[in-house]
Amino acid sequence: MRIGFAGLGTMGGGMCRRLAEAGFEVTAFDLDAAAAERVAAGAGVTAVARPAELAAPVVVTMLPDGAAVRAVAEQLLEHLEPGAVLVDTGSSDPGDTRELRELAARYGVHVVDAPVSGSPAAARAGELTLMAAGDAAALDLAEPVLAALGRVYRVGPSGAGHALKALNNLLSSISLAATAEVLLAGRAFGLAPELMLEVINASTGRNHAAETKLPAHVLTGTFDSGFALRLMLKDLRIAARLLDEAGGPADLSRACRGIWEEAHAKLPDGADNVEVVRWLEAEAGRELRA
């Protein structure tokens, strides 16, 4: 099966290679031609110079936002056969996704939003979580491709995948910030962060930040989770709009977004998402690392 793939960054590069390893005939594009050539080298992937050259029964995008996806789609749609499927695996605004669906429908092309959750290592290993949304027929066509990337959950109609992704990242951010604040408080009482995490992860406070992000990417001093803080902030802004539309309590969510807004303003451009802990450390006047 031929597929096209646009967006070969930290996540997209690994996903593209994974699909080639799974036996798909992959054509790939990135605005950074050097990135495309790096992914293509030895991976059985063909790098192309223009989005129009990605035309295939299924085209996958892993791009920063809905505007970037639409820019690719506008150059690609007229080259796709009716019945083709465009799959957005990045984090886009659900409203953008629904607008893209309407645009693609004029060409007889289906749109599936299937944002992923997981690390760059999970992308390379085909162990991502995919939140797939769209028409059943389109999901059936995209299923073999998505299944090669990880575990697929069908979550609802167009836009539902991107909504769930934003809400998941909101919850993930709350966990990271709360755990870091707890560790900083414990540090003031002479508790070792490593010991605190060991106990927390054997107790009811256990969460992904405590199990993975903090021990692997913060306490090591590497701050290299592979996800940009600016992209997490984008998702938190999307989640904030969803919460406003839904109505109801959202105090924790607003506080969390505020932390990321301030950290983004103070940290260097290109900061990793877990570097929000650096900002929390500065606010606390102490560091987690010895």
Image (cartoon, grey):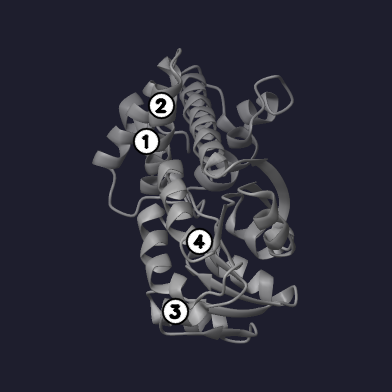
CB of mark 3 within 8 Å of CB of mark 1?
Answer: no
Residue at mark 3: 52
Secondary structure beneath label 2 = helix
Tell me if residue 159 comes above or below residue 8 in the rendering: above
Secondary structure beneath label 4 = loop
Indicate left or right for 120 with 106 as reference: right
Residue at mark 1: 237
Label 2 crowd (10 A; few <14 / some 14-19 / many >=20): many
Q: Position of residue 142 (x, y in %)?
A: 67, 61
Secondary structure beneath label 3 = helix
Q: Mark 4 and mark 3: span between their CA atoms? A: 16 Å
- The residue that appears at 63% across and 60% down in the rendered structure is 123
Q: Position of residue 147 (x, y in %)?
A: 74, 59
Secondary structure beneath label 1 = helix
Q: Amino acid at mark 3?
A: Ala
Q: Mark 4 and mark 2: span between their CA atoms? A: 26 Å
Sequence-first tag of 1 and 4:
4
Q: Amino acid at mark 2?
A: Cys
Occupied quadrant, residue 273: top left
Residue at mark 4: 62
Q: Mark 1 and mark 4: span between their CA atoms? A: 19 Å
Residue at mark 2: 256
Q: Amino acid at mark 1?
A: Arg
Sequence-first tag of 4 and 2:
4
- 98 and 264: which is toward the camera: 98
Q: Nearer the viewer, mark 3 or mark 1?
A: 3
Q: Mark 2 and mark 1: span between their CA atoms? A: 10 Å
Tell me if residue 35 comes above or below residue 276 in the rendering: below
Label 3 crowd (10 A; few <14 / some 14-19 / many >=20): some
